[in-house]
Image (cartoon, rainbow, N blue to C red):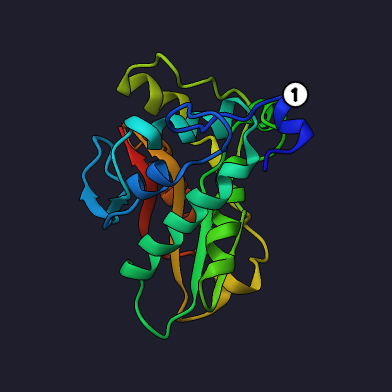
Amino acid sequence: MRTLLDLILPQDCAGCGRCGVGWCADCAESLAGQPFRVWPRADPGVPCWALGRYAGPRRRAVVAVKEQHRRELAAPLGRELARGLAALRTPRRPLVLVPAPARRAAIRQRGGDPVGRVARVAASLLSDCAVAPVLRMGPGVRDSVGLRPEQRRRNLAGRIVAPTGSLPTALRHPEAEVVLVDDVLTTGATASESVRALTGATVHVRAVVVTCAA
C-alpha cells in the first residue's frame, strides 16, 4: 500500500522510470553478472575490472546517485559491488576498499561522496572488509566532462594525493588486498593517478573495480 508521501511525491524507478518504486526488480536483475576485465587507455598498472557497461539501467542509476541525490540507490549498487568483489578476492585475506576521489565542489553539490557510500554498503556485506577513504584531489582539478583523453590526463596529473604519514590500520595489514573502487572507468586517468598516489604512500594496489566501463 502506497504511503501518503508516495501519493504526493511519487517515486520513479531510477533505472526505467516505473512509477511507485525507487529501484524495480527488473532493473535489479539487470545488474546481475560477473566482473570482466577492461583495458583503459591510461593503464594504471594493475588489473581493471568492470561490473557492467555504462548503459541502460546501470548508467541511469549511477547518474541518479551522483546528480539527483538518490542516496537509496547506494544499496543496490553496493550489493552488486559486493558480489563482484566476492568473486575476485583471494579467500582468507582481508580486503580494503579505497574509493576514488572526487572534487570537493562535486562532493558538496552531491551531498557527500557517492562512491564512498557505495563502497561502505559493499564492505558491510563482506567478511573482513574495510573502507579507507584516504585519497584526495588537490586544487585546480576541472570537471572532466567534455575533456579529451589527453586533457583528462593533464587535468589530474599530480593532483591526486594520499597521506604520506600514518596510514589507516587496515592499509597497514601485511596481507591486505587493496582495491581501488569507482563508479565509472572512462579513460583510466583517475584510476592511474589514484594508483600512483597510493603506491607513493607505500600502498600496494591489487586491482581497480568499477561499477561501469564507458
What is the quadrant of residue 67 in the picture? top right
Residue at figure coordinates x 42%, y 47% from the top left: 28
Q: Nearer the viewer, residue 93 or 149?
A: 93
Q: Position of residue 61 (x, y in %)?
A: 47, 35
Question: In the rendered image, is residue 109 in sight?
Answer: yes
- Total numbered labels placed on residues in the image: 1
- Is 129 on the left-hand or right-hand side of 188? right
Q: Find numbered disc 1 in the image and state the secondary structure of the residue it sits on.
A: helix
Q: Nearer the viewer, residue 17 or 98?
A: 17
Q: Quadrant of the N terminus?
A: top right
- Is 190 on the left-hand or right-hand side of 32? right
Q: Nearer the viewer, residue 209 or 171?
A: 209
Residue identifier under label 1: 8
Residue at figure coordinates x 59%, y 62% from the top left: 131
Question: In the rendered image, is residue 193 in sight?
Answer: no
Q: Position of residue 182 (x, y in %)?
A: 46, 45
Residue at figure coordinates x 37%, y 53% from the top left: 208
110 over 161 or under it: above or below: above
Q: Position of residue 167 (x, y in %)?
A: 64, 66
Identify the amino acid type marked 1: Ile
Q: Quadrant of the C terminus?
A: top left
Q: Residue furthest right?
A: 4
At label 1, counting other C-alpha atoms closer than 10 Å, the crowd grade (few under 14, some 14-19, many 20 or more) is: few
Q: Nearer the viewer, residue 125 or 102?
A: 125
